[in-house]
Image (cartoon, rainbow, N blue to C red):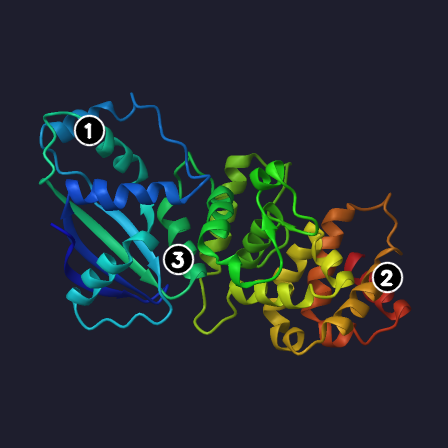
C-alpha cells in the first residue's frame, strides 16, 4: 500500500493545499520514519518509557492518531486527490514531519516485534505550501505548547533544513560545522535563524533574559501568529539572496555578518526591499560606513549597545532611501531622536 488521499481543501491563511488520507504502518516505517532524520538537530526522542503504552497498543492493533507531513512546492497545481497522492509518492524524500515524530519513533520500535502488523491503517494529513515562511508559520501554530522544542529551536532547525543555501555564494555554518572546520568569512547559522525569527515577528527584540524563557516563547508564538504570512509579500529567501548579493563587497559583508546588524537588516528590508534591491553593493558599503560613523556617537555607558544596534540598523534599512543620503551629523541627529 502507498498513500491514498480521499479529501482536499485549501488553507486560506497559508495559501496551501491540505489533504487527508491514509496509508499503513509498513509504508510509514519505510517512507515516513526516515524523514525524522532530516532534521539534524530535531527534537530528541522522548524517554521510551513515556511511549511504552503506545508501543503496546500498536502491537495490540491500535489506530494511531494521524501523522502530519508537509512539502514546499511553489507552483503546485492540484485538480484532484489523486494529484496529491501522486505528488507525495514522487517527492516523499523531500517531505517534513510536522506532527508525529515521537509516534513514528514508537512505531519503528514496535515494528521489531513479531506481533507487529504492518497492514494496520495509519491516517495522515498533508500540507503542500508555496513558501518556507508559510510552512513554518503552520508548524509553529501546530506545535504551540509542546515543551520539548521551543519556537526558537524550531526556527533554527528549519532555517538550516528548509532553505537551500547551495545556490548562493556566501557560506552559512552551524555551530557543529564550525567546530569541525571553520570556513573563513562564513555566516553563523544561529545569527541567520535569529534574523529569520525577527523577520517573521517583525521585531528585533525576541531575546529578553528578564522574562522567563517559557513566557518569552509564548510571546514569540503570539508575535508569529499576529504576523501571519501575507500573499505576495517578501519572503525570507529573497532576503537571503540580497544578503548574498551585497556580500560581494567585503565592507558590506563584514557589516552584515554582525548578528545584530543582520537582525535589523532582515526586519527593515520588509519595507525597503525595492530600494535595497536596486542598490549597488559599493553604494551599500558606503551607507554602512555612514551608519557606523553615526553609531559611534552613542555613549556606550548609557545604553544597551546590542539592543540599539538592532533597532537603529532596522530603522536605517527601513528608511534606506532617505537616510543613506544624509551626512554624518544629520544621521546622528536622527539617531538622537530615535534613542531619546
- Disc on res. 294: 2
Residues at marks 3 and 2, CA–CA distance in whole angstroms: 39 Å
Residue 27 or 319: which is nearer the viewer? Answer: 27
- Judged left or right of residue 317, residue 230 is left
Residue 90 or 124: which is nearer the viewer? Answer: 90
Mark nearer the viewer, 2 or 1: 1
Please tell me whether residue 35 is drawn above or below residue 17 in the rendered image: above
- Quarter of the figure that contains the C terminus: bottom right
- Judged left or right of residue 171, residue 45 is left
Please tell me whether residue 205 is drawn above or below residue 147 in the rendered image: below
- Judged left or right of residue 106, residue 134 is right
Please tell me whether residue 303 is drawn above or below residue 334 in the rendered image: above
- Disc on res. 110: 1
Q: Earlier in the sequence, mark 2 or mark 1?
A: 1
Q: For residue 57, which quarter of the picture?
A: top left
x and y percentages locating residue 117 in the rendered image? 9, 34
Q: Find disc 3 in the rendering and name its residue.
A: 135
Q: Residue at x 66, y 56 (%)?
A: 262
- Judged left or right of residue 222, residue 318 is right
Q: What element carries label 1?
A: helix
Amino acid at each position: 500500500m502507498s498513500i491514498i488521499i480521499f479529501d482536499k481543501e485549501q488553507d486560506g491563511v497559508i495559501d496551501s493545499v491540505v489533504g487527508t488520507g491514509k496509508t499503513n504502518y509498513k509504508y510509514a516505517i519505510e517512507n515516513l520514519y526516515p524523514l525524522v532524520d532530516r532534521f539534524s538537530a530535531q527534537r530528541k526522542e522522548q524517554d521510551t518509557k513515556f511511549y511504552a503504552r503506545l508501543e503496546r497498543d500498536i502491537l495490540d492493533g491500535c489506530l494511531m492518531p494521524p501523522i502530519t507531513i508537509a512539502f514546499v512546492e511553489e507552483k503546485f497545481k492540484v485538480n484532484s486527490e489523486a494529484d496529491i497522492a501522486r505528488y507525495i509518492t514522487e517527492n516523499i524524500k523531500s517531505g517534513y514531519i510536522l506532527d508525529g515524530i515521537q509516534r513514528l519513533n514508537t512505531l519503528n520500535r514496535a515494528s521489531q516485534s513479531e506481533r507487529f502488523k504492518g497492514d494496520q491503517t495509519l491516517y495522515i494529513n498533508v500540507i503542500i505550501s508555496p513558501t518556507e515562511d508559510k510552512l513554518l508559520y503552520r508548524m509553529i501554530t501546530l506545535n504551540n505548547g509542546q515543551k520539548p522544542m521551543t519556537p526558537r529551536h524550531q526556527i533554527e532547525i528549519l532555517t538550516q533544513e528548509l532553505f537551500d543555501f547551495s545556490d548562493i555564494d556566501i557560506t552559512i555554518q552551524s555551530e557543529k560545522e564550525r567546530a569541525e572546520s571553520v570556513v573563513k568569512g562564513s555566516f553563523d547559522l544561529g545569527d541567520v535563524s535569529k534574523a529569520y525569527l525577527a523577520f517573521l515577528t517583525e521585531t528585533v527584540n525576541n531575546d529578553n533574559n528578564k522574562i522567563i524563557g517559557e513566557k518569552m516563547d509564548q510571546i514569540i508564538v503570539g508575535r508569529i501568529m499576529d504576523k501571519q504570512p501575507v500573499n505576495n509579500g517578501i519572503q525570507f529567501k529573497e532576503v537571503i539572496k540580497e544578503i548574498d548579493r551585497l556580500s560581494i563587497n567585503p565592507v558590506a559583508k563584514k557589516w552584515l555578518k554582525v548578528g545584530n546588524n543582520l537582525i535589523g537588516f532582515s526586519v527593515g528590508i520588509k519595507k525597503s526591499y525595492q530600494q535595497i534591491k536596486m542598490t549597488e553593493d559599493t553604494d551599500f558599503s558606503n551607507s554602512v560606513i555612514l551608519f557606523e560613523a553615526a553609531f559611534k556617537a552613542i555613549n556606550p555607558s548609557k545604553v544597551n549597545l546590542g539592543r540599539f544596534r538592532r533597532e537603529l540598523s532596522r530603522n536605517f534599512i527601513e528608511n534606506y532611501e532617505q537616510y543613506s543620503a544624509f551626512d554624518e551629523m544629520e544621521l546622528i541627529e536622527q539617531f538622537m531622536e530615535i534613542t531619546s
